[in-house]
Amino acid sequence: MRLLSSKASCNTHGQDSSYFLGWEEYEKNPYDEAMNPEGIIQMGLAENQLSFDILESWLAKNQDVAGFKRDGKSIFRELALFQDYHGIPSFKKAMVDFMAEIRGNKVTFDPNHIVLTAGSTSANETLMFCLAEQGDAFLLPTPYYPGFDRDLKWRTGVEIVPIQCTSSNNFQITESALLQAHEDAKKRNLRVKGVLVTNPSNPLGTTMSRNELNLLIDFIKVNKDMHLISDEIYSGTVFSSPGFISIMEILKERNYLKDSSDAAQVWNRVHVIYSLSKDLGLPGFRVGAIYSDNDEVVAAATKMSSFGLVSSQTQYLLSAMLGDKKFTKNYLLENQKSLKRRHRMFIYGLQKTGISCLKSNAGLFCWVDMRHLLSSNTFEAEMELWKKIVYQVKLNISPGSSCHCTEPGWFRVCFANMSEDTLNLAMKRLTTFVATITGANESKKNSGTSRRTMSLPNWVFRLSSRDHREQEER
């Protein structure tokens, strides 16, 4: 008799994807400047560590808040006792005001329509439970965040149908690709409940164009049983033009008045995911949110949020921090400058190695083009290259196949989760490797000899290009 449930013992979590396996290898041998200088440098983790000094400075100046005091008196007991799962009103107000500030106050958000969750992972899964039944599908443009295979599918039973985007137009969504994905779902007898996009994109590091956003609104306007989810957790990381356009701004531009019957149907089917993990660099605080003008969705998501609440202490601290408008204005400005500076440094390092990447203007990573380093234009060759980068170069990066990219040779590489010295070392390692592999390729062409296969752990061969096989099955 099976001791665990089928859900607990199934392998649909996605943990055996190369995206997560790279993390496992890093954790076995993490780089440390003093203790392990030959270790693996983590470039597969989208964390923003560039503006901690601003956060720490605010905490130093507001020690009463950090010490859970109000007017000099402890409120520890008040925060330690049970709190309603609707969330602390002052924090919800500070959260929606911060979201509006990021969007240049072109749109506003009602605190009564925000649902707090334990990070965006919880927010995305909660929306799936609210909007879809097991076996229903959502359309997602490729490449997409590998964690969505876990967040959207694992416990909900929802399917993901890819909207196949390509480098020919910088991976933008086209009408033909959107309609083809819809047709693909129909052929699989899947009921499509909507479209989910990340804007700015993870892993591309680009903002969506006004044309793309209007295309999506038009799509759900025609398909009245579909929803549109815009995951905007990187909205505050935009560091250069073009600027960020929220889906809520598009609705406003189209003069959709919420009190008109036709427009209300569209507003009620557009939902925004937000988090403080990327924009404020606080993934450990586990603060996410769902914003929706649909009262039924808000009510259902609020009840479900009891399975993943944000602690009262966290809400109290951040309500004070985000309520400090002088702080938020300075933080957003300085963080933008830091990201732009680090991005420029990273791009320059790549260029010195002869590697280019997709032009980007947001996020904590770049979509790096290593197609010229592949031994062949196949996903097998991509996995071969990835293994060498992890084990020989000792850099953990994310292969495009783990992001369901349709073209081999693209990689997501993060640049904001380390010091400048560590990034310089990573670029030095990569430069040496590229020179070696380029020379080896030339030698191979001239001599016709083949290279020996390197010794790798057994799980690497079990991967066997699992990710690329998934591409062929889709």
Image (spheres, rainbow, N blue to C red):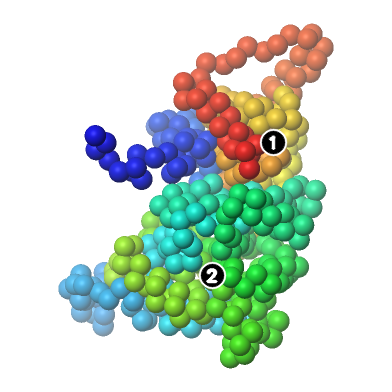
Q: Which is more foreground, mark 1 or mark 2?
A: 2
Closer to the camera in the image, 105 or 340: 105
Q: 56 above or below 249?
A: above
Query: Is 335 left or right of 59, judged from the image as shown?
Result: right
On the question of residue 367 being in view, the answer is: yes
Judging from the image, what secondary structure is the residue with disc 2 in? strand
Q: Amino acid at mark 1?
A: Gly
Q: 367 above or below 16?
A: below
Crowding at dot 1, Cα within 10 Å, few <14 / some 14-19 / many 20+, comes out as: many
Query: Is 168 left or right of 463, judged from the image as shown?
Result: right
The quadrant in which residue 439 appears is: top right
Gap between marks 1 and 2 measured at Cα: 32 Å
Residue 409 is tagged as 1
Closer to the camera in the image, 383 or 439: 383
On the question of residue 422 being in view, the answer is: no
Q: 385 above or below 90?
A: above
Rendered location of residue 361, percent (x, y): 68, 58
Q: Amino acid at mark 2?
A: Val
Residue at the outermost right position: 446
Q: How many marks?
A: 2
Judging from the image, what secondary structure is the residue with disc 1 in? loop
Rendered location of residue 190, percent (x, y): 57, 54
To which residue does mark 2 refer? 272
Rendered location of residue 259, percent (x, y): 58, 91
Closer to the camera in the image, 469 or 453: 469
Residue placed at 67% from the left, 62% from the top?
A: 207
Q: Indicate which disc, 1 or 2, sits on the residue closer to the N terminus.
A: 2
Crowding at dot 2, Cα within 10 Å, few <14 / some 14-19 / many 20+, comes out as: many
* For the residues bearing labels 1 and 2, Cβ distance under 8 angstroms: no
Residue placed at 72% from the left, 67% from the top?
A: 215
